[in-house]
Amino acid sequence: MLKERLRELVQHNGYELLLVLLLAASMAFSASLSPYFLTVTTLFDMTSQFMEIGLMALAMTLVIILGQIDLSVASILALVGVVFGLMNERGISLGVAIPAVLALATVLGLINGWLAVLFRLPALVVTLGTMALYRGVGQILLGDRSTYGFPAWFVSIDFRYIPGTPVPLPLVIFAAFAVVFYFLLHRTTLGRLVYAVGNNAEACRFSGIAVDRLQVMVFGLSGLMAGTAGLMMTSRFASARWDMANGLELDVITTVVLGGTSIFGGRGTIVGTVLALFVIGTLRYGMGLANVLPQNQSVVIGVLLILAIFVPEAWRAWRARPRRTARRGGEAPAQVAGGKAG
Amino acid sequence: MRRQEAGTAGQALDVAVPRPVEGVLAINRGLARFRDLGLVVAIAAVAAVTAVRSPQFATAANLQRIMLDISLLLLVATGQTMVVLTRNIDLSVGSVLGLSGIVIGFMLKDHPTMAVPFILALGAGLGLLLGAINGALVSWGRVPAVIATLGTLTVYRGLVFIHSGGQQVNPQDVPRQLLQVARPGGLGLPPMVLMALIVAVAGWVVLRYTRTGRAMYAIGSNPDAARMRGLQAGRIIFLTYLISGALAGVAGVLYAARFATVNPASAGTGFELQVIAATVIGGTSIMGGRGGIPGTILGALLLGTIANALAVSGVSGFWQRAVEGAVILAAVAVDAVIRRQAVRGVGRRA
Amino acid sequence: MALGARDASGLSTRGLTKSFGGPPVVKDMEFDLRPGEVHAVVGENGAGKSTFLKLIAGVHQPDAGQIAIDGMPVQISNPTVARSLGISLIFQEPTLFPDLSVAENIFMGNHPVRRPLPFIGWQRMRAQAAELLQSIGARIDPAQPVGDLSVAEQQLVEIATALSHRARFVLMDEPTASLTPREVERLFGIIRDLTARGTAVVFVNHRLEEVFAIADRITIMRDGVKVGTWDAREISRDEVVRRMVGRELADAPVRTPAQPGEVALEIEGLTSPGVFRDVSLSVHRGEIVALAGLVGAGRTEVARAVFGIDPFERGTIRLFGRPVRFRSPREALRQGLAYLPEDRQHQGLILPMPVAHNISLTILDQLSRAGWLDRRREREIAQEQVRRLRVKANSVTQAAKSLSGGNQQKVLVGKFLVTRPQVLILDEPTRGVDVGAKAEIHRLIGELAAQGMAVLMISSDLPEVLALADRVVVMRDGRVAGELSRSEMSEEAIMRLAVGADGRAAV
């Protein structure tokens, strides 16, 4: 009985189990580098370093399942930080500024969606262009300097904890969003539509689904999360620059892809993304402990991104290997491999 | 007929294509020619306006600066054009340029008397190797080009930092004979400019007059049919990445010649964006199958002129990135309109 | 006709077997192709004909068996090898490069070069292309991009390509599927020319009239195996059908026509320039109106315009007397009009997703409250449909792609039935469906009509039309050519309207 259950678990959630193993390995690696790693405080504090990536990765999961990609998330993050800082400098109260920049971030995401839909352009190129455009605007607005001087209650969010616990606020915020996204993707119509459109947009059109509107919405959501991440990062660093989070889109995409979301669309889970986030986060932290420079860390992440394509695809290929199942007579089977649609 | 659209990873998404109505495609073709003319007009307009507003634009020194910038861009864009024609992309060219500049630059400190052709060959060789990795990932590893070259972009840039140890290549490290390449020589033009032109022409000849070149178009136009016809798509795609990498490697050397410094943080950063912009503005479709070197030349001309015009007009360099982004968006939108098939999937007449 | 010793010349296969991870799609296939003959291969859907052709063309590799040319066994490991052996495959859908010119498509990979340098001679290529095109009577400009051409013209380009490779064996997979009768005649002329020159042509086709018009010999396949090969003069159409199906075709149950009720759908003067013109028809409650015509007549286009996928320029559509103009399928579905698309695999179902998710796709907003999806209700509704439509599936959580064509079609019907439509437009509802499931779907359509549904059925299957329809509206080249009542209906009558009284289709 147990064996049956175990086998079923492996079959359905095998990839997530693999990620858990990777996480354990990653933590073992970091623990080997520093005796302080496995303390509760270290572990919790470590997470604050990658919660922005996590926030963006949640939305990026939906984007990639939909069959799209958003290279501009880090640029939206930076532009939001810049605009937020400038508003603060002009004395605008944060109660106004925060919703304003979140709205801005959403609009920036919607622009991505509109351009992609209206001109039938591949999201790759659109977000390549907006990646440059948005960051460029940030550069124009703020120049080379930093903006700081935020009110005390806003900054250092990573040093605020749930009273009496070592749990830092960024982790709490991320966890809340992760839960929301989990239900969004796996329990709501929006999530179902994302999977459906990611698998076959044409069939969805014939079924009366507003495909274009969905795509624009998801890009808007991606922008919103990038904006939230921008606020979080500004708080952590107590400052903002045009080049903050430079290249962070790489981490976000790597996280999503390593989490088992297929770059070809139609497949992916929030759980996988969260697991992958911690795998990469612990890895980066461990490298930091080993005094590896951030740029050099990126080398490892770059390699990981490429491997992140291989490993899930190889896993899927192994699972889809020809077995003795009866197949209806007919011609060659469809190219799409089986897998859970969520 | 089913057309293939590029999904995010460049994979082919089957979309049925409508039987084109006669008039529409004729108009679209006219629009395409209009685009080339439009580019020439735009270049002339930007140049004219800037020349009027800033007298230092039209000086010989400034024109030479434009030419040098454009030749660097054109050199690498020639390779990128081939990659894009096959429906792929190479985002790593900026990092390859940087890595080549740093590696060769440091090496020259110990070999200051090396002959220029040999230096260039080394740059090309390094670029070839880096391009081979891209090619292997994309054509045999089945890693989508976006992801693969995004990954190598990061890895190579990381290698730049590692190799440089934070140091940069300084003017005294660059041998004089190399610096000469960026200075006017015979024919009044710097050798660098001639090199870029020769490479561009060679690229044009390959794309127009060789079977391999035509196969690049075919692969981008219909990858499945290309496979059925035995066009060796894997090998040809690999070749395009070799070329793209090699040219970026040469560009790294020429970068050192031009600027006499190579800073690991800034050499080539963001360059891939300009290269892709030049390629796409020039009419090479991001979906492959259409375009070519003449368009890329125009694209490089336009971008180089705009960048210089901005600098000369006193517009801060901060604008450049935003302008590049906007230009890419505009160019790709125009291409999409020209290429306009019916918005929704359509089947055959039944 | 017994097969004797292996023919010394020509192409032959012995024991050819291929499976794709399940039961063999082609099993022990024995086949002989003589030079200069037209050899038709017929069989039902799923009989393995296309796979068989692809094995010969090097697209797939056989698991077992042997192919021999002129008595010598050959290994055809890829299409290039096939080409070098003189084998050319022309697909159902042309595989061409739309951005490139006709001439380049013909010579891709093989451009004529100007010696001594390996540079392409464009003029020479265009001239040679023009020559090839002329030799098959195709009036196509070699410099034109192939994407501009019609399907028939693209096919001609493929044939010209086959000629350029000096093909000895030309394989054609359903070449007439998208052709007008005139184009079919032209194709047959080309085939006769080819065979006169000694080229052998293998011709997979569903349309038996065409098969008997052109073929010298006929091979029948059933379930991946060869049933037999006959000289075309020695076998009758009925016998071919019988051997294809393996059983006597029961007469299709004649539907008792219901009393038609009020006018449900009324189309008047519908026009989309260049696509269809002045289309008018009406469908009453309880009626089945067939929309017949050849491929290319514009039937699907009309349906798409009504359903709100494509725009139209002029005309009115009335639903129960109320003028409507749907701007999207969503609007149409909401108002009770459903359209089942032609291509169930790409336009109808989402194959990797479970049956239940496919069925619920059209009514997701009804199954959710404030966005929250009621999965239990979804499962219930799906199970109800599966039961009602007698879909053969293990459970509603099964992926749609694991079902057979007929069952997939039923799921597609179920998916639109849950929207509770009052007008149903079916586009080729039994295409690619085996005979058993076909009968079930016919019965289903009859039931729906009897329950008051207004059904507009686009169909190219004339026996199906005759069995089900109360009236037939025939389209030709974008216009309504005529309408036939039940008493006036016959295959010839429909064909006459579809083709034009003088036998020539308008260009």
Image: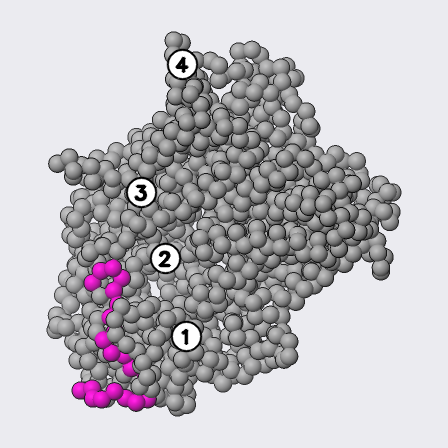
Point out which mark residue B302 bears: none
- Element at badge 2? helix
> Do the residues indicated by labels 2 and 4 lie within the same chain of the protein?
no
User: Hey, which quadrant is residue C131 in on the image?
Assistant: bottom right
The numbered mark 3 sits on a residue in which chain? A
Task: Tell me the residue that label 3 is attached to.
Answer: A341
Please name the amino acid that badge 2 sits on.
Ala
Residue placed most toward the observer, C35 or A161 = A161
**Which callout, 1 or 3, points to the residue nearer the camera?**
1
Q: Nearer the viewer, mark 3 or mark 4?
A: 4
| Left or right, B279 with reference to C322 | right
Question: Against C455, is C240 above or below?
Answer: below
Tell whether A227 sits left or right of C413: right
- Indicate the secondary structure of the residue bearing disc 1: helix
Mark 1 on the same chain as mark 3: no
Residue C449, quarter of the rendered image: bottom left
**Residue pictured at 27% horizontal, 68% vertical:** C63
| CA separation in Å, label 3 and label 2 | 31 Å
Residue C81, numbered label: 1
The residue where tag 2 is placed is C303
Question: Label 1, label 2: how many angstroms apart (C-alpha)?
Answer: 44 Å
Q: What span is in magenta?
A: C1-23
Give the amino acid type for the residue marked by disc 1 in the picture. Answer: Val
Could you tell me which residue is drawn at 43 percent across and 78 percent down?
A: C84
Judge from the rendering whether residue B122 lies leftward or rightward of residue C452; answer left or right: right
Instruction: Identify the residue position indicated by label 4 in the image.
Output: A166
